[in-house]
Image (cartoon, helix red, strand yellow):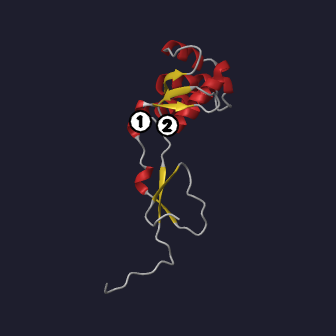
Amino acid sequence: MRKAGAVLSGRASAPSDKGSDMTVKLSSLKADLAREAKGDWIEYPDWPGVSLNVSSLLLPAYRVARDLLFQRLQRLHKGKPIPPDVLNTEIGKLYHQHILHDWKGFDQPYSRDLAGQMLADPEYRSLIAAVEWCAAKVSDVDVEFVEETEKNSERPSAGV
């Protein structure tokens, strides 16, 4: 049994111990904005040995560029659905410009030119998806929980 006040770590949700009251440590929700902007190495689980150095999808410059891209594509397609290949190509270009900084684990070393060619090619949609997945992980936080004092614990005596 954990002591009251012990800090627990978790990625997404509280431990499922029924009967124990858990409180989220508010300071653990703080984003690491420097890491999100600079980028970090994230292993892609579907391709063993492959890691991508990526910035976060929450990077302000990327989000503004993405929103402007959507506005432009909506005007161009006059309210009709944007073809998936067009969207993948354009998003891939934004990932090249803002998100992907390096890779390791492929048979070809990273170069900015090669990455730009591949991310703009709809046939490399699996690479675009990998960049997106890794970039989403950069902004994950380690949620911590503080175990509250048990309800049935004895109250301290007033005079002692």
Q: Residues within 10 Å of mark 2 (few under 14, many from 20)?
A: many
For the view shown, which residue lies furthest in the front direction?
Answer: 1
Task: Residue 108 in the image: state x and y as whole percent.
Answer: 57, 13
Q: Which residue is mark 2?
A: 138
Looking at the picture, tell me which residue is in the foreground, 85 or 11: 11
Looking at the picture, tell me which residue is in the foreground, 73 or 101: 101
The residue drawn where x is 54% and y is 17% is: 115
Task: Residue 36 in the image: state x and y as whole percent.
Answer: 44, 36
Q: Which residue is mark 1?
A: 35
Dot label at residue 26? none
**Mark 2, secondary structure of its residue:** helix
The residue drawn where x is 57% and y is 58% is: 15
Residue 17 location, quadrant = bottom right
**Amino acid type for the residue under numbered disc 1:** Arg
Label 2 or label 1, whichever comes before in sequence order: 1
Indicate whether 48 appears above or below 120.
below
Residues at marks 2 and 1 touching, judged by CB atoms closer than 8 Å: yes
